[in-house]
Amino acid sequence: MSTDSAIRWTHRALPLVTGCDYEGPGCRSCYAPRWAYRFSHHPNAQLAARYQGTVAKTASSRIVWTGHVRYNDQVLHTLLLVSRRKQLRWFISRDGDLFHSQVTDAQIARVFAAALLRPDQQLILLTKRATRARSFLADPGSAALIQDEARRLLEEVPEKKRCLLAQHRLQEFGTSNSILPMANVVVGFSAEDQRRFDERWVEFREIAAAGWMIATSAEPLLRPLLLPSDYLALGDRVWLIVGGESGPTARPVHPAWLRSLRDQCVPAGVLFFVKQWGVFTEVALAGAVQANILAGTTTEELVGYARDCIVVWPDGRSAVPERSAPWWAAQRFGADRETVRPGEGAVLMRRVGVASAGYLLDGQDWDRSPPLPAAA
Ligand code: SF4
């Protein structure tokens, strides 16, 4: 699906909000600070300015958020300029969180304003700040704020350049108060484990009840997830994207977690999308070796895999395959340094990189996505 975005489930990814704060274990290997650091040193001054002050390098050469958040107004102009011949999916805010506390309500409203002006484009908003998302969408004042921002946004784009559709839309919705929910906006939350899923679903349940299409990004998936019945009952009004982690400190995803989510979603009609395995792939072991590992009777056979492999249990624990494994292996994988007694459900996974690990689950590409809006 991807056109100019490296993210498989979207066509375009915009750096509207840049800079963030860490918000739970899913943020540990966040790619965005490294990305932001690179761009903040870009020779193109306009591009570099979008990231200035958002990241810093520590004494130990780690790249971390500074806590400063930028909102790059002009990024949304792209949406108003895109041709009517293209119906695209836009991931808003690739390098930050739209619902971060440093982003104002008017700035959030501006995104919905862009969606209002271009009903032929689909906007995907993902957040870890579910409470803020719910309170913005439930606020009776938000519709008027969005309409004000739509007028302002349109005026910022030269008349000759802006798509005519946007102009017509402004006249069409006038002062109508019934602009929410928007059929071309998918609002969603990230959920790396059950606790975060449950906490954020409490808020998003209300958003779903108000008629919005919901997305969940279970990436990086760090633990198994059991989806609640009222979530599954929404069927194809829910889009679940799952994926393993990437980057130098990536953690593995147990294959059973992906299979379980597929088996929960598909019968319920929930749109199920596997983005990537991450950097690890399951090692196919010879039958006898696998049997020994599953029985937990021996670890001898695993010793040869110590340099680039990791054992993962269904509950999320992981370990390098021997007590004497080099210290860097334990540190690199964030694993417990212990004698491996794999036992039931453990799998051996090898670090092969994102491209080699791919995204097929049991040989199938799971790529169901919400339908794009019709051409207008
Ligand atoms: S909320 Fe998103 S952008 Fe912010 S640190 Fe976490 S993963 Fe990165």
Image (cartoon, rainbow, N blue to C red):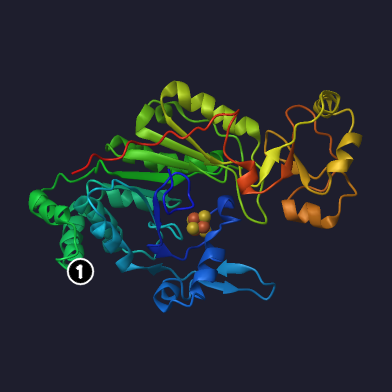
| Residue type at the position of mark 1 | Glu
Image quarter for residue 243?
Answer: top right
Residue 63 vs residue 106, the one in the foreground: 63
Is 347 drawn above or below residue 125 in the view shown? above
From the image, which quarter does the C terminus lie in?
top left
- Give x and y (percent) for residue 11: 39, 49
Residue 199 vs residue 330, the one in the foreground: 330
Q: Is residue 66 visible?
A: no
Q: Is residue 329 visible?
A: yes
Residue beneath the point at 37% across and 39% down: 214
Is 198 drawn above or below residue 229 in the view shown? below
Task: List the residue tagged with mark 1.
Answer: 156
Single out the residue that lies furthest toward the front: 85
Residue 131 vs residue 184, the one in the foreground: 184
Image quarter for residue 315?
Answer: top right
- Relative placement, left or right, of 19 versus 322 is left
- Give x and y (percent) for residue 333: 73, 51
Mark 1 falls on what kind of element? helix
Is 82 drawn above or below residue 375 in the view shown? below
Residue beneath the point at 67% across and 72% down: 61
Residue 38 vs residue 153, the one in the foreground: 38
- Give x and y (percent) for residue 12: 39, 53
* Total marks in image: 1
Single out the residue that lies furthest toward the top: 267
- Give x and y (percent) for residue 141: 20, 54
Is 62 drawn above or below residue 23 in the view shown? below
Residue beneath the point at 66% across and 47% down: 251
From the image, which quarter does the N terminus lie in?
top left
- Relative placement, left or right, of 265 versus 144 is right
- Relative placement, left or right, of 255 versus 51 is right
Mark 1, Cα crowd under 10 Å, few <14 / some 14-19 / many 20+, is: few
